[in-house]
Image: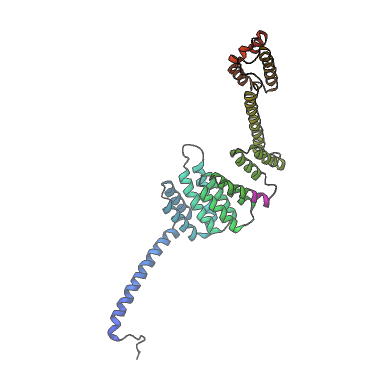
Amino acid sequence: QMQPCCKYRWTSFPRFMITLILLSNHVSTEWFKWADSGSSVADTRWDELISEGVELHSKYMHGKARDLIVRTAKYHHSKQSQIISLLLERARAMLADGPGRDEVCARGILESAMAVAQMLLDAETIYIVSNELIAANSVPAALEGYHFVLKLLPNLPSAYHQIGLALSRMNRFDESFENYYKAISLFPRYAISYNNIGVLLSKMGRVEEALSHYLAAVEIDQNYLDAQNNVKAARDQLATKEKEASIRKLRTSIFDDFPDGSADASEDIMRASLRRLISEAQTRRRQAPHGVLDEELRASLAEQVPRIALAGDAEALFDLAT
């Protein structure tokens, strides 16, 4: 004869059974919900599910799209690399120039790709997705990706360089310099980091420092066209600054020795000053680059005509008019 195998009294058994049945029913219901959700992923081709996720991104339903893509990647874990490749392909298509360009959709797709890439824990894949996020102007997400890369590869120079690039896009220049120089410390022949530092310095008006960095980049890579163009631009900018300084000097100093035209000035003093003025002006104009000082010189001389006319030296005034 079988004996009871529980400590509950017979009178409490119905209540216990009811509780057990209700609990079992709840667990079963939740299990069926999970199983139904999983079966939809399992019963559908992974590429069709990813396409569905991309379609949701195109409707800007990014949260729902990301959930579907991540769930698909978890179930079809052996297809994660292919899923990322497909997402990158779709995002690049959205970033192509033309009427169909959609940065918002591309950013959503790339952020889903980043979620899958981080599941893979593959530094190269995360780095590639981060670069695409930069192209899509999703700079904070890209920055997060590069920092994730450094967790996997702490001494990767290109990751520090890209962090510097992302920070410069966010106008965080001091931090950008720090990361560019970190990249150079790890790889001293990193020409592009030298060039990018030069670009930042130029934006800050520190053109001479910028030029030295451009030249360092060209010295490392003599075929680096961008750095060569930046060298020329910096030199032109410095030359322009020198010309402007020369013009300012002309306007402030060319008349220093000329009397103020008051009655106290003798004719001899006025004539001598006028001769020096004309000689100085002619010398400065000959030495200046063609077409740079002529207009400024004309304006400066014209300002002094009322005073110069008091000199009473017809020949000198004729030379001045000439």
Q: Residue furthest left?
A: 11
Q: Nearer the viewer, residue 178 or 281?
A: 281
Verify whether residue 45 appears in magenta.
no
Position of 264 with respect to 15 (left or right) is right
Q: Main secondary structure of the magenta part?
A: helix
Residue at 40% in and 61% down: 37
Residue 40 percent across, percent down from the top left: 41, 59
Residue 15 percent across, percent down from the top left: 29, 79
Asked whether residue 276 appears in the rendered view, the answer is yes
Q: Residue furthest top?
A: 314
Q: Is residue 20 above or below residue 225?
A: below
Q: Nearer the viewer, residue 74 or 146?
A: 146
Q: Is residue 17 above or below residue 166?
A: below
Q: Is residue 2 above or below residue 130?
A: below
| Rendered-image quadrant of the C terminus | top right
- Which of the 4 quarters of the picture holds residue 234? top right
Position of 270 with respect to 19 (left or right) is right
Position of 250 with respect to 120 (left or right) is right
Count of numbered badges drawn on the protein: 0
- Which of the 4 quarters of the picture holds residue 3? bottom left
Q: Nearer the viewer, residue 175 or 95?
A: 175
Q: Is residue 244 above or below residue 214?
A: above
- Which of the 4 quarters of the picture holds residue 38? bottom left
Residue 74 percent across, percent down from the top left: 49, 60
Verify whether residue 186 appears in magenta.
yes
First to last magenta residue range? 181-191
Q: Residue furthest front?
A: 264
Asked whether residue 86 appears in the rendered view, the answer is no
Q: How is the image coloured?
A: rainbow
| Rendered-image quadrant of the N terminus | bottom left
Residue 163 percent across, percent down from the top left: 58, 49
